[in-house]
Image: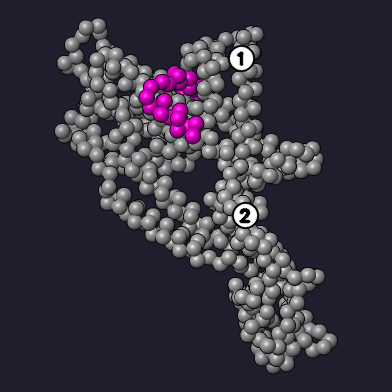
């Protein structure tokens, strides 16, 4: 079928692309009141949402090898992924994991569109499966919500608003505490909530801020987070291609659309009866019949609504369905395209690098830096000393006792500032100050490279290289 015929069938009215459905011509927000969804896709989303939300809330309590299932502690620069602890010394591995994740998102979007947004994104899960469910329970369906919004502030409206926003606030507090637990750990969150605010003011402010942000997002910002803020939504226009799966309206079957009269024979019209049920259930207020749009999160609510109408008028379901532009236009779906093959190859390479670096990383590492502001000191006994800050990181599950020796310079001596040996707890880090002394006569150059061995139980477990500075030789 030629492109001109397709355009005629699809009513290619591009005016909808000049604005978004939730803002009017004056820039004022149009509040969306979606009709309560129901149907087979919605039932599947409920099951998926229950599982994912259970994992989300249980996550901070799950331990693998004594470490959190997921911890992103940017404050202490400690990260735990599936129980594996990463420190600043592992930054390049974390960077590789992050790059791999982004490439996976790109690949997933190219193939399956925005399935993540509608089925797994926490914003959508909480908004559609928690907060809107509460809203339907308290305020009623879309019509009742509109009526309540226009109602003057009487006893009924005040009662419903107070009840709804109180429940919203309680859930937002729970979400805020859970999010904080992924950043600082569940033990620290328990400590903060069990103490007076003055005992840990920074932690208390953090919990209040998180809870307030989540309340504002789900009570007021709502779908605007997906439409106007989320960067992944903005990337859709770049990532999606004609072969990408998405929630789509079959314009070949549905057009030309038109109202259906009782006992009408529709030989000159398509299956779409222009009932607008797909529009009424959309949580972002769009008309899916206009084609793929930035605001669409692939929640599939329009599919359930349309399928219900099709069955009632004796038509086959699937007028709106998960498919691609190519599949509608040509009748077959292409998945493994050259683009998908390219992204898959890049992702496979990145994952291989992650595996290599993770499996090959040292169990114990040390970082040695010269004391800021100091170059060297000349002692009365003719020795030159340099002072260093050393940070030890133990990535193993065992406590270690360590010692350091200079292996390539026999005249050098090293001593720890303070009493005691280097005791390093399992999966922890420790800082120390060390002094290295070398007789001035033994120094041939201003800068001498030293090789220091980190020893545990008589075995060298890491090697540190550093420079030792001395006076200029004339």
Q: Quadrant of residue 150?
A: top right
Relative horizontal placement of residue 255, taking residue 413 as reference (left or right): left
The answer to whether residue 372 is visible is: no
Above or below, comparing residue 155 to residue 322 in the picture:
above
The answer to whether residue 5 is visible is: yes
Q: Disc 1 on helix, strand or loop?
A: helix
The N terminus: image quadrant:
top left
Question: Percent position (x, y) of residue 182?
Answer: 60, 44
| Picture residue at 21% right of the left edge, 7% below the top | 263
Per the model, the C-alpha gap separating discs 1 and 2 is 44 Å
| Picture residue at 48% right of the left edge, 58% below the top | 96
Q: Is residue 43 magenta?
A: yes
Relative horizontal placement of residue 380, taking residue 138 as reference (left or right): right
Magenta-highlighted residues: 23-51
Which residue, given by chain and number where applicable, does mark 2 sit on? Answer: 78
Asked which colour scheme the image uses, the reply is: one colour
Which residue, given by chain and number where applicable, does mark 1 sit on? Answer: 160
Question: Percent position (x, y) of residue 365?
Answer: 61, 67
């Amino acid at each position: 079928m030629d492109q001109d015929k397709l355009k005629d069938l699809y009513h290619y009215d591009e005016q909808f692309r000049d604005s978004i459905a939730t803002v009017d011509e004056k820039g004022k927000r149009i509040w969306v009141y979606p009709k309560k969804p129901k149907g087979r896709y919605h039932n599947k989303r409920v099951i998926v949402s229950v599982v994912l939300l259970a994992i989300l809330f249980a996550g901070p309590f799950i331990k693998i090898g004594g470490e959190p299932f997921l911890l992103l502690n940017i404050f202490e620069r400690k990260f735990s992924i599936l129980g594996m602890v990463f420190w600043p010394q592992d930054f390049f591995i974390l960077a590789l994991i992050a790059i791999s994740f982004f490439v996976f998102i790109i690949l997933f979007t190219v193939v399956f569109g925005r399935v993540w947004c509608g089925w797994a994104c926490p914003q959508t899960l909480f908004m559609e499966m928690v907060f809107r469910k509460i809203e339907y329970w308290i305020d009623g369906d879309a019509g009742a919500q509109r009526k309540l919004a226009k109602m003057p502030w009487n006893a009924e409206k005040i009662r419903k608003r107070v009840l709804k926003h109180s429940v919203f606030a309680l859930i937002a507090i729970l979400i805020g505490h859970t999010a904080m637990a992924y950043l600082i750990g569940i033990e620290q969150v328990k400590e903060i909530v069990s103490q007076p605010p003055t005992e840990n003011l920074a932690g208390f402010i953090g919990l209040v801020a998180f809870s307030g942000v989540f309340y504002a997002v789900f009570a007021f910002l709502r779908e605007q987070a997906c439409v106007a803020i989320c960067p992944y939504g903005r990337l859709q226009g770049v990532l999606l291609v004609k072969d990408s799966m998405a929630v789509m309206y079959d314009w070949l079957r549905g057009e030309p659309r038109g109202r259906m009269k009782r006992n009408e024979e529709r030989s000159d019209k398509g299956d779409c009866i222009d009932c607008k049920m797909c529009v009424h259930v959309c949580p972002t207020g769009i008309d899916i019949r206009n084609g793929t749009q930035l605001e669409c999160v692939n929640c599939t609510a329009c599919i359930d609504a349309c399928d219900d109408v099709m069955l009632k008028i004796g038509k086959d379901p699937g007028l709106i369905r998960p498919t691609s532009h190519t599949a509608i236009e040509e009748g077959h779906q292409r998945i493994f395209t050259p683009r998908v093959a390219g992204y898959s190859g890049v992702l496979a390479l990145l994952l291989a690098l992650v595996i290599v670096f993770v499996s090959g990383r040292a169990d114990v590492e040390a970082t040695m830096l010269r004391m800021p502001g100091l170059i060297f000191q000349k002692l009365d006994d003719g020795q030159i000393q340099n002072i260093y800050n050393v940070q030890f990181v133990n990535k193993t599950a065992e406590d270690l006792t360590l010692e350091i020796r200079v292996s390539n310079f026999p005249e050098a001596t090293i001593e720890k500032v303070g009493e005691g040996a280097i005791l390093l707890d399992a999966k922890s880090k420790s800082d120390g100050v060390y002094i290295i002394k070398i007789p001035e006569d033994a120094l041939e150059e201003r800068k001498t490279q030293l090789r220091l061995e980190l020893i545990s139980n008589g075995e060298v477990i890491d090697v540190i290289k550093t420079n030792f500075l001395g006076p200029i030789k004339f």
